[in-house]
Amino acid sequence: MNTMSETNHFTPDDERMLLDAIDNWVEKSVRPIAKEFDHEDKYPHALVDEMKELGLFGATISPEYGGLGLPARVYAKIVTRVASVWMAPTGIFNSHLIMAAAIERAGTEAQRQKYLPRMATGELRGGLALTEPDAGTDLQAIRTVAKKDGGDYVVNGNKIWITNSLHGGAVLLLVKTDTTTEPRHKGMSMLIAEKGPGFVVSNKMKKLGYKAIDSCELAFQDYRVSADCLLGGIEGKGFQQALGGLELGRINIAARGAGIAEGATRHAVRYAQERKTFGKPICEHQAVQLMLGEMASRVEAAKLLVDSAARAYDTGQRCDMEAGMAKYFASEAGVFCSQEAMRIFGGASYSIEYDIERFYRDAMLMCIGEGTNEMQRIIIAKQLVERNKI
Ligand SMILES: Cc1cc2nc3c(=O)[nH]c(=O)nc-3n(C[C@H](O)[C@H](O)[C@H](O)COP(=O)(O)OP(=O)(O)OC[C@H]3O[C@@H](n4cnc5c(N)ncnc54)[C@H](O)[C@@H]3O)c2cc1C
């Protein structure tokens, strides 16, 4: 298998080589198993081993900590390519890389040295544990509490929907270290939480789509973690650290949305040439042409917005508006194109023999995860006014 590990300079040739390696891997290893593993909701362990070999768990981690140091714009293209065939595996390395990016950006040097090399190889795989049963969009309402006890924090509380929490070894855990401070976010902190006594994976959730990947409920029951694991070493910064991590997360979700849109459109273009009605392929009926024309245009627009947001991220500037636009538009493109593809497939769309029903089931999650699309439009509008003050 081609590995990406020696490639740290990104000339157009290097980029092409990387993306070719991904395309080959997707065709050889991802496409053949997608249907079975999705329908049986089976975790793709062998695929994870291959992702390690490819270097995907270190994709955006800096080379000094053992990663590939890919710019977000290259990383986003990888995600789109994988998601255009099967979206779910991208979740295995995305949540992990958001955790790594937060440690690299906000962690102490000792934390970077301790965690990033293990994360880059995939030996330690992680995720982000923010959401609780009563707090998703309103993260400041979380109830998980970490109390200082000597050199440790003792954590109690519950999280829900946490990706990679069954098969991974750690999460970046959003907690309240002070439940009385106003504004509420000043009492929030992040802990690097490796599995241990009191870190309980209480339920693997059954889902509409995004199957094969573990999304679990977690219970923290007097879970002890060393105070050295407080991200950045200072209490009260957790909310900003969580929001900072979401910019990369949103670009990733946008890239997944673009991939779903592209994959669904690809299936539809093929089927529309194979299926005949009234003596001709359905792609020659104008009603189907109108759908395909709209779908293909949205795919290209989604990919361009993802690229533009990723390039803004790579400059290091604040890019919540760009990431929000890309996430909003591309995830809606994924929903639109998968629905239109369902129409083009007609009755066949309902058969689990075809892949299109999986795109349809997977697409909607992109409108919800990493901040709902309602919130994205609110963020875009706020930034728009902020950047255009009269
Ligand atoms: C498969 C899956 C995987 C996930 N993985 C993770 C993970 O790894 N880690 C993690 O921490 N979380 C994860 N999540 C949780 C996800 O991030 C939340 O579901 C999402 O943030 C929305 O929160 P909520 O479900 O509580 O919805 P709510 O916050 O209850 O929102 C419900 C509705 O109200 C709207 N709404 C809420 N507040 C406002 C407002 N102020 N203005 C306008 N509209 C508003 C929302 O847009 C939405 O339409 C995952 C979720 C799923 C389904």
Image: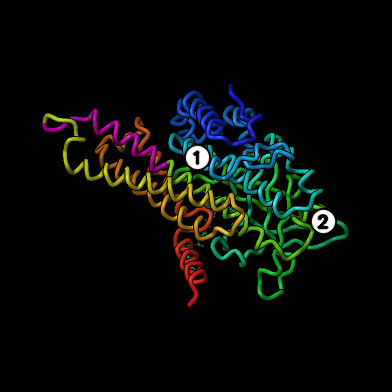
Front in this rendered view, residue 201 or 362 = 362
Give coordinates of residue 7: x percent, y percent. 63, 31
Residue at image mark 2: 227
Q: What's drawn in magenta, residue-wise?
A: 260-278
| Quarter of the image with the N terminus in it | top right
Q: How many marks?
A: 2
Q: Residue at x 45, y 43 (%)?
A: 209
Q: Is residue 246 above or below residue 349?
A: below
Residue at image mark 1: 77
Could you classify mark 1 by the number of other residues whose Cα lies within 10 Å: few (under 14), some (14-19), or many (20 or more)? many
Front in this rendered view, residue 320 or 340 = 320
Q: Assess whether residue 270 is covered by the magenta stretch.
A: yes
**Sequence order check, earlier mark of 1 and 2:** 1
Q: Residue at x 72, y 58 (%)?
A: 156
Q: Amino acid at mark 2?
A: Ala
Q: Where on the picture, by quarter, is residue 351?
A: top left
Q: Where on the picture, by quarter, is residue 135?
A: bottom right
Q: Assess whether residue 237 is covered by the magenta stretch.
A: no
Spatial CA span between label 1 and label 2:
38 Å
